[in-house]
Amino acid sequence: MSDAHPLLEVRDLRVAYPSRDRSAGSGWTEVVRGVGFSLGRERLGIVGESGSGKSQTGRAILGLTAPGGRVTAATLKLGDIDLLACSERERRSLRGGRIAMVLQDPKYALNPVLRVGQQIEETWLAHAPAGKRGGRTERRERVAAALREVGIDDPARVMRLYPHEVSGGMGQRVMIAMMLIAEPELLIADEPTSALDVSVQLQVLAVLDRLVAGRGMGLIFVSHDLRLVQSFCDRVLVMYAGRVVEECRACDLDRAQHPYTRGLLSCLPELGGTRRPLPVLDRKPEWASENAAPR
Amino acid sequence: MRPALGLSVQALTVRFGDYTAVDGLSFDLPPGGTLGIVGESGSGKSTVLRAVCGLARRQAGSVALTGEDSPAAPGTAAFRRQVQMVFQDPYGSLHPRQTVDRMLAEPLALHRIGADGPDRERRIERVLDDVGLGPGYRFRYPHQLSGGQRQRVAIARALILEPRLLLLDEPTSALDASVQAEVLNLLDALRQERGLAFLMVSHDLAVVTHLCENIAVMKGGRVEERLLASDLAEGRAEADYTRMLMRAAKGFARRDTVA
């Protein structure tokens, strides 16, 4: 699905942090090592275990790598904008504007002392095109519309609530509404449903799904949950030790080639499964090797 | 092998202020059996475990061990020795400034097990071996261990008292999939070797059915449905809520493929 003009193009992305152990070689530890992909208006899943570099990849695209980290890439382009050549100021105006991010846990990602409506409005004020901010009533109407779009039926009530007064699923919808009000082209969702109960998880995914389809947004869905990604995304990148070890269409994941992907799929217990003991991953050092081409 | 223990819980009620977390819950766990409690956050499933081991106060109802002539009563040292708990988050349940050795020695000291030093030494070495950690891990701190290794330490800390009933509160939900498989295999093997009874809580149907034969589905502090793991596997669930959990476990389903 990578069309001629990809929304996002990433080539040889590398993220490194200074190592604590100065004696170990160059003094930098690479956590993302040569990741490359291009994204169209599709749902791209990035899966991997903790420490595989999946979140670091998402953060590097946004320009949210922790201070001290070093980001390099052969190409890192959003449309025609070269993200690496942007100043910090330009990156900031893109963030929340053209690229938005939904984080894992709404409990920590929302400002606890601001009402939900104010927080959403703040995003609009920060990113609205000049002269289009609108008056107070107009802005409130816009916030209400954003909340309705994520499936909240009584936006007037929800707008007045504080984050501690909303449930996890509602909080995550508020986050999504906040991200969407500036109408981004690209949404990066980092484990957006991991902190939620399964039933709520599906509601939030349905909201994301509808928005991506309806607005033609690109979505990068970062998750550790292979089954979820398989059922939700169009395409999947499997990351291991900072590298993409496999790239395939989500529907082909069951026919994955790489032993790591296959191992990850087979070590999950299944309803009605009778395999005892469960197969465990036998990690091979060559999986992490930089010379191995992604399958 | 020592006789297996079971658990009988009758009309258990736990309230926090005005909020009733567990509402007149009853169940029987046969000696050496396995019961998995499934439910979403707020359903009261973890509170059941906490009430059984005495971490939450019972407002009403009874908790009793079954399976031997004079079972230990709740609140006694013997009960606490026979019933041990493994918590959800191995990042929070281990003391950050104690070595593995010290964390394993503490239950022994508390329960005055092992008359002399050498005996305790042997027990610590053996339990580390049982959970698949070599002696090399004995003098490490939690921050020097991975998530899976920490959960093994937490399991070792429970096992060192040679309990007969293990309370497992989402023992693998904080772990990566491949590590989850290792810990599930470990628990499975320990149960078969030692005839342990398991009372396990989880939101993951596949994990629960992997370890437990009997399943109770909880919602709002009550049991919504009771069934066998094999029934669940073959889709023989009656309650709507259980069916919803089963659908959700299958992943995301796009309803409107037409649009």
Image (cartoon, helix red, strand yellow):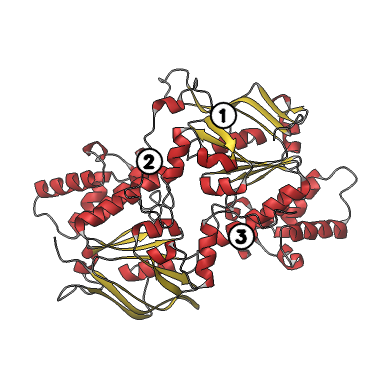
Q: CA distance from mark 2 to mark 1?
A: 24 Å
Query: Is disc 2 placed on a helix, strand or loop?
Result: loop
Q: Is residue B176 visible?
A: no
**Disc 3 versus disc 1: distance between alpha carbons?**
34 Å
Near-viewer residue (B184 or B118): B184
Q: Nearer the viewer, residue A235 or B50?
A: A235
Callout 1: 10 Å neighbours few (<14), some, many (20+)? Answer: few
Q: Which chain contains the residue that carries disc 3?
A: A
- Mark 3 burial class by Cα count in 10 Å: few <14, some 14-19, many 20+: many
Mark 1: secondary structure: loop
- Alpha carbons under labels 2 and 3: distance apart: 30 Å
Q: Quadrant of the N terminus of chain B?
A: bottom left
User: Do dots 3 and 1 share one subunit?
Assistant: yes
Q: Amino acid at mark 2?
A: Ser
Name the residue rendered at 79%, 44% in the picture: A127
Task: Look at the numbered discs 3 and 1 and tell me whether their residues touch, using CB distance below 8 Å.
Answer: no
Whole-percent x and y of residue B230? 38, 64
> To which residue does mark 1 refer?
A68
* Residue at mark 1: chain: A
The disc labelled 1 sits on which kind of residue? Gly
Q: Nearer the viewer, mark 3 or mark 1?
A: 3
Q: Which mark is drawn over residue B258?
A: none
Callout 2–callout 3 Cβ contact below 8 Å: no
Tell me the kind of residue under disc 3: Gly
Q: Residues within 10 Å of mark 2 (few under 14, many from 20)?
A: some
Q: Which residue is mark 2?
A: B146
Pointer 2 and pointer 1 on the same chain: no
Q: Position of B119 compared to A31: left or right? A: left
Residue A251 x, y percent position in the rendering: 58, 43
Tell me the subunit letter for badge 2: B
Q: Which numbered disc covers residue A169?
A: 3
Q: Secondary structure at mark 3?
A: helix
